[in-house]
Image: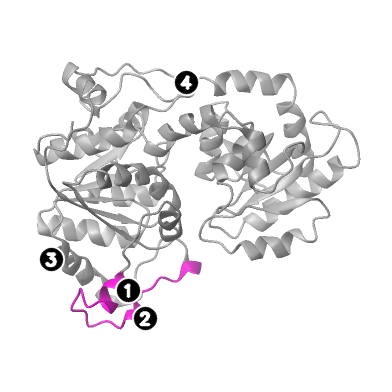
Amino acid sequence: MKIMNHSTSATFPAPTLLVSLSVSLLLAILLPITPLAAANWLFVLFDAGETNGLVPVIQLLQSMESEKVFVMAEGASVSILKRRNITPLRLADFARDGMLNLQVPADKLAFDHNAGPFISLRHVSVKEIPQQVFDKIHPHALITGLVSQYESDFLQAAKKAGVPSFGFFDFYDVPGKGSIFVRLCPEADRIMVSTPEIAIGMAQAGIMDEKRIMVTGHPNFSGLCDLKASFDRKTVLKSAGFDPDKQYFTFTTQYSTRNDELLTLLARVMKSMSLKKTAVADEAPELIIAPHPNQDPDHYRTLAQDFGIPYHILDRSKISVYQAMLASDMVFTESSTTGFEAILLDRPLVHILLPGSDPVNQFNVRRGLALWATTETELHEAINALAGDKGRQIGEKRALVRPLPDAAKAIVDGVLKVMKIPTLR
């Protein structure tokens, strides 16, 4: 199976797949970056996971004077990019600035953020808009996420314009049959994935032809290892207004209506823990709630007022969700990407699921990297188990999980290779 690959190591602990790496690619990773080609790069982003993953790629390209980078964004991507000092372009901005000769009022070029990720622009002429953007920017390459109709519209426009397109698959498992990834992946000329296992799984499932899959690694996953190595818990917590002598549990929400029920379940368990000594600590941990970037923190502030336990709403201007997870004794989520990121940060993880959910669908549970619970009793047991021998066994598996290195550089070189432009190294 000939899948483009940029590393000899696999990300996940089992099973290990040996993938060959040519000497030229190895040298490409090791040599310093020297801009040798000029190109217009267009990024189109919508969701949080893909944006966090591609920010290092954008920053790498922006550091090269020869490269021009345009980043279009809607949804959760907008606030993430701004926090990383990247100015996103929105279609409404194009209309207001007169950059596009659109027959659509600027106030119609907006998303209904309550409709979820499977939405497009309200106006019926959305499929005409990406082509007009292409005519103004003249991109040499399009890099998008794969979770929204917005991105799909740009992928289709790139195909018509003859612009090479690259879809970034930010998930850490092979997508299921009902996933929007399965529909959007074939629309891109190439798909970039984080591990050889995912590439092989997607090819075997018929989602994507193996020749169109690039194993690049995941830039954000790569960066988490550096963050973990340099993390100073006491300094970070004190600067963010937390007491470093306290213990914390972090719950990361998803862009979903299920968060309230699952978060309330965790709060009930934590309240009962505060009434007696547990295996976790003599003093009950405090709760950190990390809302999805597209959600209103005030909603959770109102919800948590009735929990009867000490809580904090994450303020991303003071502390990142990754720092909060690193500072926590345990992390909880339903099925957010932050769950796998907690694994990479070597944090004990529990997936809190709705009754009737199949835990096998959770990658981290299936690989023995996390526990799961649907009831108060199960959640109590999971918390105590992670604090004991079971937790140490899981921790040994968790410690083996390593992302591929230099993923941002691998993505840039992979795109240039497909475009038949000399690499930037």
Mark 2–mark 4 distance (CA, rounded to whole Å): 49 Å
Q: In the rendered structure, are the residues bearing label 1 and label 4 in contact, judged by CB atoms less than 8 Å apart?
A: no
Question: In the rendered structure, which amino acid carries the disc numbered 3?
Answer: Asp
Secondary structure under the numbered disc 1 in the rendered image: helix
Secondary structure under the numbered disc 2 in the rendered image: helix
Q: In the rendered structure, are the residues bearing label 1 and label 2 in contact, judged by CB atoms less than 8 Å apart?
A: yes
Relative to 269, residue 317 above or below: below
> Which mark is first along the chain, 4 or 1?
4
> Which mark is first along the chain, 3 or 4?
4
Residue in the image at 45% along x and 59% along y? 79
Relative to 415, residue 39 above or below: below
User: Which stretch appears magenta?
Assistant: 91-114
- Looking at the rendered structure, which numbered label has been put on residue 135? 3
Question: In the rendered structure, which amino acid carries the disc numbered 2?
Answer: Asp
Mark 3–mark 1 distance (CA, rounded to whole Å): 17 Å
Question: In the rendered structure, which amino acid carries the disc numbered 1?
Answer: Ala
> Which mark is first along the chain, 3 or 2?
2
Quadrant of residue 103 within the rendered picture:
bottom left
- The residue tagged 2 is 107
> Which mark is first along the chain, 4 or 2?
4
Picture coordinates of residue 322, whole percent (x, y): 55, 41
Quadrant of residue 303 within the rendered picture:
bottom right
Secondary structure under the numbered disc 3 in the rendered image: helix
- The residue tagged 1 is 92
Residue in the image at 36% along x and 75% along y? 122
In the rendered image, the quadrant that contains the N terminus is: top left
